Image: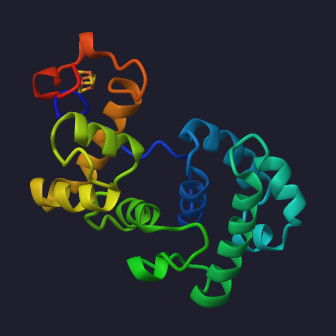
Amino acid sequence: MDTLYPNVGCELNYHKDYELVIAVMLSAQTKDSAVNAVTAVLFNKYPTLEQLADTDIKDIEEILRSIGLYKNKAKNLKAICHTLLRDYDGKVPEEKNVLQTLPGVGNKTAGVIRAEIFHIPELPVDTHILRISKRLKLTDQNADATETEQKLKRLFPKDRWIKTHHQLIHFGRYTCTAKNPQCENCKLSRFCTKK
Ligand code: SF4
């Protein structure tokens, strides 16, 4: 993985901590490229947390319209902005259990935020990592995301968790895709259950 992907990282665009929280929440069941397209408009039009919190939700829905679940995500976005301003002085908290109280933020999203903003060792498991972990026999075939996260955290040294998270996602996005994986070019095929 280090040979294949020595320098991979988060592919969501953001400049401020709260923008990452919003971008990760928006990325549920949505490609990062699609999220980047809408956040480029959103964060340009509303460059502060206060402005986003005060914006008419209909305008946010209009900007998010091209991504899945946009109405629910617009509601979560407004609620996240209000909560951060009201309860956390506009700052993103780092505690996982606190992050998970934000609307639309679950275990995986909280892990991504902690790793990306605070550099706290985390190995959140998304759909790519779950699929690859099964194909490469890193987890049980019927394991869920939570069980797989625990398994991967036992398998990899803590100081590699964040890098491993990014490498596995990259491998899943561009080589070991859900449909039509590029097995003929795969450098990890000797470990694979699927080939
Ligand atoms: S051989 Fe194919 S299915 Fe197996 S890990 Fe490589 S790309 Fe994925």
Q: Give the image location of residue 78, x and y in percent.
A: 74, 70
Rendered location of residue 152, percent (x, y): 19, 54
Q: Going 29% across and 40% down the picture, which residue do you hit?
A: 168
Q: Nearer the viewer, residue 101 or 143?
A: 143
Q: In the rendered view, does 79 fall on the left or right side of 165?
A: right
Toward the front, the furthest residue is 142
Q: Which residue is rendered at x = 17% and y = 20% of the image? A: 187
In the figure, 9 relative to 49: above or below? above
Residue 28 percent location from the top left of the image: 55, 51
Name which quarter of the figure residue 52 lies in. Answer: bottom right
Placement of the N terminus among the 4 image quadrants: top left
Vertically, is 63 above or below 168? below
Tell me: residue 3, above or below residue 101: above
Q: Quadrant of residue 66?
A: top right
Q: Position of residue 123 (x, y in %)?
A: 28, 57
Residue that extends furthest to the top in the rendered view of this protein: 184
Q: Quadrant of ligand 1?
A: top left
**Which image quadrant for residue 173?**
top left
Colour mode?
Answer: rainbow
Q: Nearer the viewer, residue 101 or 144?
A: 144
Q: Is residue 43 left or right of residue 36?
A: right
At a point 67% along the width and 39% down the height, the residue shown is 37
Residue under the image location 21 percent in, 19 percent down: 195
